[in-house]
Amino acid sequence: MISLRFHGFHTFYLPRLLLFANYATSKIIDGDHPEMRIWSWFQDDTFNEVNLLLYTSQNNPLTFKLDDDKNDVAKRFLDHGFDANRPTKILSHGFTDDGNRFCSEFIEAYGASTWDVNLICLDWGKYADTDMPIYIRAAKNAIKIGTQIGQKIVSNLLIKTLNQNPQLIHAIGHSLGAHLSGHIGKHSGLKIGRITGLDPARPYFENWVHSAERLSKTDADFVDVIHTNSGHLHEGCLSMPWSVGHVDFYPNGGVHMPGCTDKEPGWWNLHWNYYQCIADLASGGCSHMRAASYYADSIRHRNDSKYFLSQKCADYQSHCTNDGPLPMGERLQPAM
């Protein structure tokens, strides 16, 4: 397990103030607690409004559903320019987000760097609670949807029907989408090549939760994680601080990103640390979203060998070695 840091944008994200109450609820309904039955109505069992969009070098995306006939979808994929010899990227957004907003930056980045991938954008916004934010329901839905994507899309469609090498499949997920991506890997039959977790969500996926529920380095042949808002909720942080991948990156310390909470609070100087935490959350999770922006930027600059380089460290406080700096993001390869 390797932890790395490196030294070096603001994007939209809905406020997370309800997350505190939702997190308390998750403590009650997790596991075999009898109150689980009371909250069963919060969980969705069918996901017929999950949309998947295939982007290739052709201009318009191809939209399909989880339960569409796999042979029909395979034919439509090939007609739309899907190439099994190219890497397939599967993008998954997080809590209260949606596919259109989250994927747009990645679509632009891959298009700007000479389109040479099959890009599948997963839009599970209805079940990520964009309308009525109930975090625990979204977390449970992420697990179920990830399982279905792994079985129906990755295993049955991509690997078995379209004969894609699973090593060419790369799932990229932000926040709850990182754990969703983990379940894609857990349920794909053959182990996929890579999963990238972008600031994986911490609430509900604490240490005391079994590793089968969260992103793990066993979910793919190579798992890399970018931490940009890691810590506790009372610290204004939304993601897990511990290493969960083969390689974990902590840009700028991995807690609060530059530009998100840099404005001086004036007379509130005595409470600056507290102010920073609340300001980051109130800004709409600015630091939390930076992991996705950093990764998209690494796509744009993937031909630049000096971009987003990191140093190997035992932890952030320790002295770092000069052992072969690794690139964070798209250029990172398992062999590195």
Image (cartoon, helix red, strand yellow):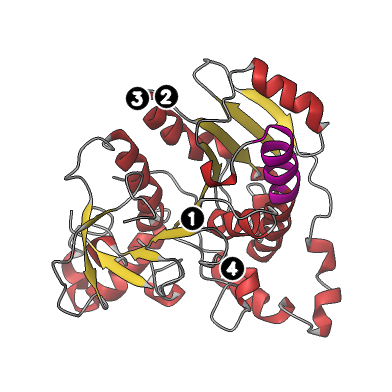
Q: What separation in Å lies between label 2 and label 4 (alpha carbons)?
A: 31 Å
Q: Which residues are magenta?
A: 149-163
- Residue at figure coordinates x 80%, y 70% from the top left: 39
Q: Is mark 2 in CB contact (under 8 Å) with mark 1?
A: no
Q: What separation in Å lies between label 4 and label 1 (alpha carbons)?
A: 23 Å
Of the pair 264 and 259, the residue shown nearer to us: 259
**Vertical position of residue 243 compared to residue 192: above or below:** below
**Vertical position of residue 74 compared to residue 90: above or below:** above
Q: Quadrant of residue 138?
A: bottom right
Query: Can residue 248 be seen at all in this image of the molecule?
Result: yes
Residue 112's tag is 3
Drawn side of residue 78 relative to residue 285, left or right: right
Q: Which residue is mark 1?
A: 15
Q: Position of residue 297 (x, y in %)?
A: 31, 40
Q: Which residue is mark 4?
A: 214
Residue type for callout 3: Ala
Drawn side of residue 276 relative to residue 175, left or right: left
In the image, residue 156 lies in the stretch drawn in magenta? yes
Q: Which residue is mark 2?
A: 115
**Vertical position of residue 250 compared to residue 46: above or below:** below
Q: Position of residue 92 (x, y in %)?
A: 56, 46
- Residue at figure coordinates x 42%, y 59% from the top left: 224
Of mark 2 and mark 4, the one earlier in the sequence is 2
Q: What separation in Å lies between label 3 and label 2 (alpha carbons)?
A: 7 Å
Q: Position of residue 150 (x, y in %)?
A: 69, 50
